Amino acid sequence: MSVDVEEWFHIPSGLDNILPFDQWDQATQRVQDVIPKMLDIFDRNKVKATFFFLGWIAEKHPLLVKETLRHGHEVAVHGYAHKLIYNQSKKEFNEDVYRAKSILENQAGKSVIGYRAPGFSITPQTEWAFDILANHGFKYDSSIFPGNRDFGHYNSFNKEPVIVKTASNDIIEFPQTLIDFGFFKLSCFGGGYFRLFPRFFIKIMSERIIKNNRPLIIYMHPRDIDINQPKIHFPLVKKIRFYINIAKTGNKLYNITRDFTFKSFDTVLSDVSFIESLEQYNIGML
């Protein structure tokens, strides 16, 4: 179970987000009201999750980081300024990652070992990001969407977790969970997909993943359950995409986390037999 801790305005658009970085400080902030609701849902169902914090969010809400840790969850990095990797140079990405990791480690008082890119933006063109992440001491990453989507995607990447071999250290990649029907791949386990599909369908697909002994990874954003977030004036299709079923999603999240047992990424990594079962992937091999 994972949560990308970002705001309602952290929606990628062009080279930035729907709200440019220099306007973030003046915008209404909602995460401090929504994350406690998610923590409560997870507490009631004995779920341990990984919360991928934007460095900017952690700076503004350090008590939110501490509260997440107090509830027994893992904190990890979602970058600092929510920029897609392929919109950054290697130098910019390196600085963004270092800034965010430093903030979180100072607040947590311990090493932070996980990373997830905004928009799943490790692609065939940005595999160089693995080297930078490994050099910063990250033990795992969850930044690949192994199917087609509007923003970052890497359709030919493994569907299963793999050990990525870099020039310096190894790093484990946890690709987002997809259902492979052969002629197309379907996601229903996070964000807008999770809001769109009914609970019974998500449950059936989850059971299919587990039956095939594959990891089930769900990702959420605070805005996915926040009925009081400011609304952006999108065209109709985007309006449906970003706001469909928000009022129902909190209850859906509660029911899905009741139906299955979820762990944080660092807990999974503590299982030596899991690590030993992974195949190796060399950058550029696909």
Image (cartoon, rainbow, N blue to C red):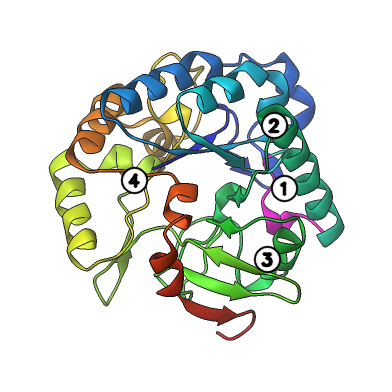
**Is the C-beta separation of discs 1 and 2 under 8 Å?**
no
**Of the pair 13 and 247, the residue shown nearer to us:** 247
**Of the pair 132 and 87, the residue shown nearer to us:** 132
Tell me, for residue 109, which label it has, or none: 2
Quarter of the figure that contains the N terminus: top left
Residue type beneath disc 2: Gly
Q: Position of residue 276 (x, y in %)?
A: 44, 73
Alpha-carbon span between mark 2 and mark 3: 25 Å
Alpha-carbon span between mark 1 and mark 4: 24 Å
**Is the C-beta separation of discs 1 and 4 under 8 Å?**
no
**Of the pair 112 and 145, the residue shown nearer to us:** 112
Alpha-carbon span between mark 4 and mark 3: 27 Å
Tell me, for residue 15, which label it has, or none: 1
Region rendered in magenta: 82-89
Q: Is residue 263 above or below residue 206?
A: above
Q: Residues within 10 Å of mark 1 (few under 14, many from 20)?
A: few
Residue type beneath disc 1: Leu
Disc nearer the start of the sequence (2/3) = 2
